[in-house]
Image (cartoon, rainbow, N blue to C red):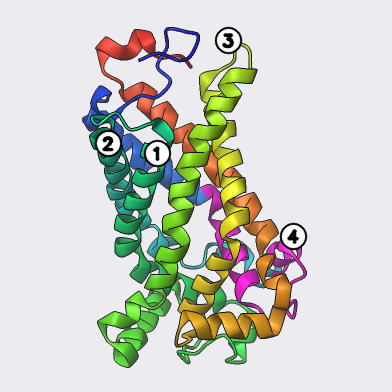
Amino acid sequence: MEVEGGPFLKTIEWEMMDKAKFFPLSMLSSFTVRCCLYPLTVIKTQLQVQFKNDVYNGMVDAGRKIYKSDGISGLYRGFWISSVQLVSGVFYISTYESVRHVMGQYGVGQRTKAFVAGGCASVIGQTMIVPFDVISQHMMVLGMPAAQKGILNPLGIKPQQGRVRLAVNITREIYRRDGFLGFYRGYTASLMNYVPNSALWWAFYHLYQDQLYRILPDWSSHLLVQCIAGSFGGFTTTLITNPLDILRARLQVQRLASIRVAFNELWAEEKMNMFFKGLSARLVQSAAFSFSIILGYETIKRISVKEQYKHLVKW
């Protein structure tokens, strides 16, 4: 396996890595990235569920007001619940790499492998994470002024509580009202959003990577090329899937009956603006997250590569 025009690995495949190194380092990298970028997730969610611009006028205004109201902890509402994604992340990347490996044995192209494997990985990841996503999103929006008035608080939870107690009370109330299925509210919308998002992101990642390899000089850093390709992939995918992410957030937080109801309500409020609601925050989050994730992911793959392949790896 060679990079076009050079004797280097373009992609470090699953069977080339020492899994004992890869898994713990991957979890550490994912946790670090989430710690740094989680405030953007809180800002994005609050922008998506507000009515027009009744609370915040954009990403910067939202960040400033959340910090002024609740301090740094306000930007990390629901963080520890959301951190369960570290476990789902292991299953996600294992599924992604395993599906790519199986498809590679049948001679399938890189972009097709990435597209199919990314979609499969997302189904596994979302099935595990949606219940925790539902809880964490309720925690995120309970800090908004509208939640104090009960507008964005359909569970009737008292917002002024410690983080652990708040999470427990939200969990109890969801189960009391809807049973176990309440934790999968918005699951279909999540799949509709994240499965194509994941599939497209990996496909665009490899597409942009191929194009950058063609136009950049041979001495360019392969790791930097991959990070830039990841950011471009995240940016492109976000532009395509933003309305689906808004519908998912509305379904999970406002407890709407169906995707159709959520769409009709959102269209009545925003009209064409629904396609751009919270987009700036999501674009920044996606580009930064994609860059950081690829930086950690590809670095760890290089560190974890087996001895016999190390001479083929270029940083």
Q: Position of residue 196 (x, y in %)?
A: 45, 55
Specify the amino acid type for callout 3.
Answer: Asp
Mark with earlier residue (1, 4):
4
CB-based contact (under 8 Å), mark 1 and mark 4: no
Specify the amino acid type for callout 4.
Answer: Val
User: Which disc is residue 112 wearing?
Assistant: 1
Closer-to-camera residue (180/234)? 234
CB-based contact (under 8 Å), mark 1 and mark 2: yes
Q: Residue at x 74, y 60 (%)?
A: 60
Mark with earlier residue (4, 2):
4
User: Which disc is residue 210 wearing?
Assistant: none
In-image side of 186 versus 224 (left or right) = left
> How far, Cα to Cα, is label 1 from label 4?
38 Å
Closer-to-camera residue (162/252)? 252
Magenta-colored span: 36-65
According to the picture, the residue beneath numbered tag 3 turns out to be: 218
According to the picture, the residue beneath numbered tag 2 turns out to be: 103
> How far, Cα to Cα, is label 1 from label 3?
26 Å
Mark with earlier residue (1, 2):
2
